[in-house]
Image: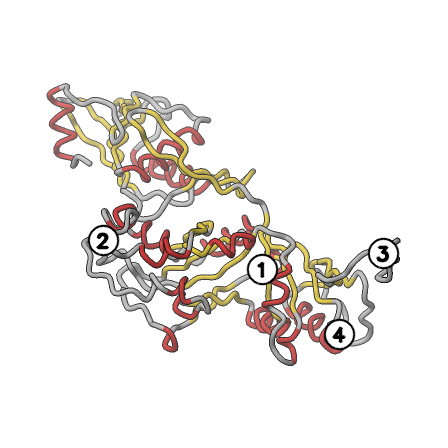
Amino acid sequence: MENLNDIKKELIEGTLREGDTIQIKPRLQRGNEDQLARLLAALSNTYGGYLIIGVQENENRCEIIGLAETKNELEVYFDTTIYKYTTGVEYSLHIENIEGKNIAIVAIMLSNSTVYFSRRDTSPERQIAYVMVGTKIQTVGRMLYKRVFKYMTVEDFLLSLYSRSWRFQEPSKWDDKFEQRFYCANYKIAGAAGNTPQLFATCVTRAKNSEAAWKVYAHGQGLGAHCLQLEIDIAELRQQLRASKLKIVEKQVEYKDERYILELHKKRSKNYSKYFGSFTFDKFIELLTLKREAYTYEQEVRLFVIPDMTVSTRNKWKKALSRDMPIDWRKVIKSVRIDKNCSAGELKAIEQACFSVGITPVFKSTIVSGGMSTPAGSVRIDFDSFDIDDMPGNSGITVK
């Protein structure tokens, strides 16, 4: 990407041309904020770039042509557009006098993780990634799901409600060594500094029915012996996580052959350059979303929280840490399916924990009586009794 002085020089010489880092807009048009947001996201995802906008003098004011906004007003316009239509674009605005004429130059920073276009007010679940190819905007990725599912033990669910939080863990705490592999790696390659920070993650799935997940999350003792499944409003979850002002990254898991993952870090691997040839934070995240093909059925999505990009100390294995993210569960949970083998005591414990956060659980197949009264203003959420092994009809059959 050219620097600001180069841009000014080319403007003076008349040699500035549009391309994948330069976009020239003689005027902006109110009402086209979504189109502007696509452009900002594409520039942010490509190399960064510059948006050159026309300015006119009007009653001693430098106004943006088409908007009649001053510099400060234009910043508000950009901030509002970025918030409403993207997952985050960093920019700086400059008003430059070029041979007696004022011109607005907006410098768009190259993002260290993929920026998505999203209409947060009307369709926040639809997120699309764009890049610049010459002067054209091109789609390179999509996240279009409206809901995801989170499996928990009853014990973890109770703790999450009472703490009003969602626990994210360092990937070195994951059970699968294949998935710990690249978080715990020692990076000595160019680009690793500042691009391999400490981070925390959680996993959800786009698959509503997963026998394996039910079995995995019902493996403990006591309250950990039964599982439940939360249907999560992904758009609301994103919004709450972003409210933390921490860096949030969401990415679908990519399923690969076991040998692919094992050989990837070796220079002789044909895929080495794909990840390590030009190593970035995005590449680091890609490595942390690789999983063996045997788990394709999970349709997993991973959410990452990065408190500080400058902290490169990644705790390994037993030293791995957790981070609890504040969550308003009333707004995030859409419905719940709960193991039908839960005892009356467990159901009562769930009911009281739900009441504590303003949720009234509606147990469809089980009556829970007595105890606390329903909190005023609470949100009613369906809790459906469920058994992954249930089979319709008679279990006894005759084969003739």
For marks 4 and 2, give the one nearer the viewer.
Answer: 2
Query: Which color mode does the image show?
Result: secondary structure
Cα–Cα gap, marks 4 and 1: 27 Å
- Quadrant where the N terminus sits is top left
Q: In this view of the protein, which residue sits in the foreground, 273 or 34?
A: 273
Up the image or down, 8 lies above or below 391; here it is above
* Residue 29: x %, y % from top left: 40, 23
In primary-sequence order, the first of circles 4 and 1 is 1
Up the image or down, 369 lies above or below 48; here it is below
Cα–Cα gap, marks 2 and 3: 57 Å
Q: SS at mark 2?
A: loop
In primary-sequence order, the first of circles 1 and 3 is 1
Disc number at residue 267?
2
Question: Is residue 310 in view?
Answer: yes
Residue at 42 percent across and 41 percent down: it is: 116
Which residue is tagged 3?
Answer: 393
Cα–Cα gap, marks 1 and 3: 29 Å
* Residue 103: x %, y % from top left: 22, 26
In primary-sequence order, the first of circles 4 and 2 is 2
For marks 1 and 2, give the one nearer the viewer.
Answer: 2
- Identify the residue at the far top of this view: 14
Which residue is tagged 1?
Answer: 150
Cα–Cα gap, marks 4 and 2: 62 Å
